[in-house]
Amino acid sequence: MMQIKIHNTLSGQKELFSPINPKEVRMYNCGPTVYYFAHIGNMRAYVFADILRKTLEYFDYRVKQVINITDVGHLVDDGDAGDDKVESTAKKEGKSATEIARFYEKAYLADLIDLNISTENTIFPRATEHIGEQIEIIKILLEKGFAYQTSDGIYFDTSKFEGYGKLGNINISEQKEGARVEKNSEKINSTDFALWKFSPKADSGQPARLQEWPSPWGRGFPGWHIECSAMSRKYLDQPFDIHTGGIDHIPVHHNNEIAQSECAFDAPLANYWLHNAFITVEGEKMSKSLSNTYTISDLKQRKIHPLSFRHWLLSGHYRSPMNFTWDSVLGSQKALEKLVFEFSNLPNNETDEDTINQLKEFVSDDLNTPKTLALLHEAFGQKKSQKTISEIDKVLGLNIAKLANEVASDIPDHIQDLKKERDLVRHNKNWQKSDELRKEIEREGFVLEDKENDSIIKKTLSSLI
């Protein structure tokens, strides 16, 4: 088995990957908070995790994958202040928290399908369905002296964990000296974080929250970070092999997961931590105020096929920032469409071993998708076999063979009639009429490829949306 090298945020270095079980990899990917649609920056994390999964499977590992669904406890502010994101949306829309969470969870899962992200046998545990497991860990942390109670909840004492901030080498020395936080003067350290928050009392006597549970310390709800420790341990044990997420998770969320898990169970949480970089849009940070938090649905409305966006993402390394522009993703669509149209013209002979050896070399080197994507385009240019292309696509996940079949199938009768008419006038060298019919066909979302005595008609990728 070829050795895989991955960049471990924990060490800050590229390391040889060595799973706990030689035949199985246990992987946890930080999932969505289901209060709104995931934007394209969010979805980069799942395409990256999918490339990792496909690479591991390509090298014959079984992958046990968990992607959590955060449907409670993620407050507007990472410092445990503000409204619960799911509850806030529910109140605005006049719906229950469960209705909101399930709606946006369904939308997220649909995005995964659109982007050809593997979900077979993936576990999607919900935070609300694992309250008991979270309470048990909090009990352990209190018993061991790593947590304390304030008037508004149970907090983890980060000064008790010597390794706090080790992920990403975060400098938190000033905060750990005991600085107070204006938002919560009862915190011992500014970096302390909520394990359990008590429900506020409503003036009406009715519950102030839509989601709350009994606990040994009072009614309330779990903090954001504890769900990942509880659910990863339940489904993957501790330690497990790989934990992934966006770089925004490093300073707070992932360091908090490490702290509570290691202190509760005296073992590392995960051996390898991988993080993807951000996407900017037209050179600016994604922001609702700038109206540039585009979603997969937004791409589809602009006739961008989701797999064209995946192609664009793979043109950059997962640890490199990328700048999204409509022109760049349209360019990716044209490039992918060219490959899809050409696929059926390739020979169907044996796999080219030299190309596959290059594939293995590139993807085993910290998931180098830019080189792998270039290899794919090169293989088309050199007229490599369909089998060779499909082998590369096992890792890239662009679904080229499937798209090639879709663009060539189910052409409507009226379009076929226009094609036949054009073939006839072209045969008679009536070039003006031939051009008019070509434009008419293209306006309907189809593309013509002229052969010597005939033409082939195909759908565009945008027409498949």
Image (tube, grey):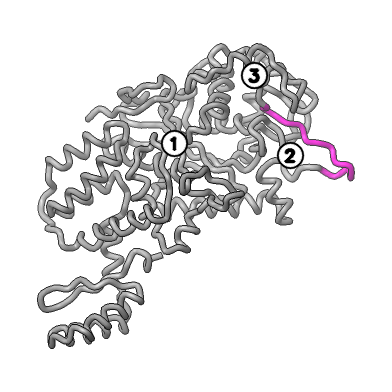
Give the CA separation, mark 3 to mark 2.
21 Å
374 in magenta? no
Q: Main secondary structure of the magenta part?
A: loop
Q: Amino acid at mark 3?
A: Leu
| Residue at the disc numbered 1 | 277
As rendered, which of 101 and 136 lies closer to the eye? 101
Task: Identify the residue at image location x=13%, y=57%.
Answer: 348
Numbered mark located on residue 202 in the image: none
Q: Nearer the viewer, mark 2 or mark 1?
A: 1
| Residue at the disc numbered 3 | 141
| Residue at the disc numbered 2 | 212
200 in magenta? yes
Residue range of the region highlighted in magenta in the rendering: 194-207
Task: Identify the residue at image location x=30%, y=40%.
Answer: 369
Earlier residue among tags 3 and 2: 3
Give the CA separation, mark 2 to mark 1.
35 Å
As rendered, which of 270 and 307 lies closer to the eye? 307
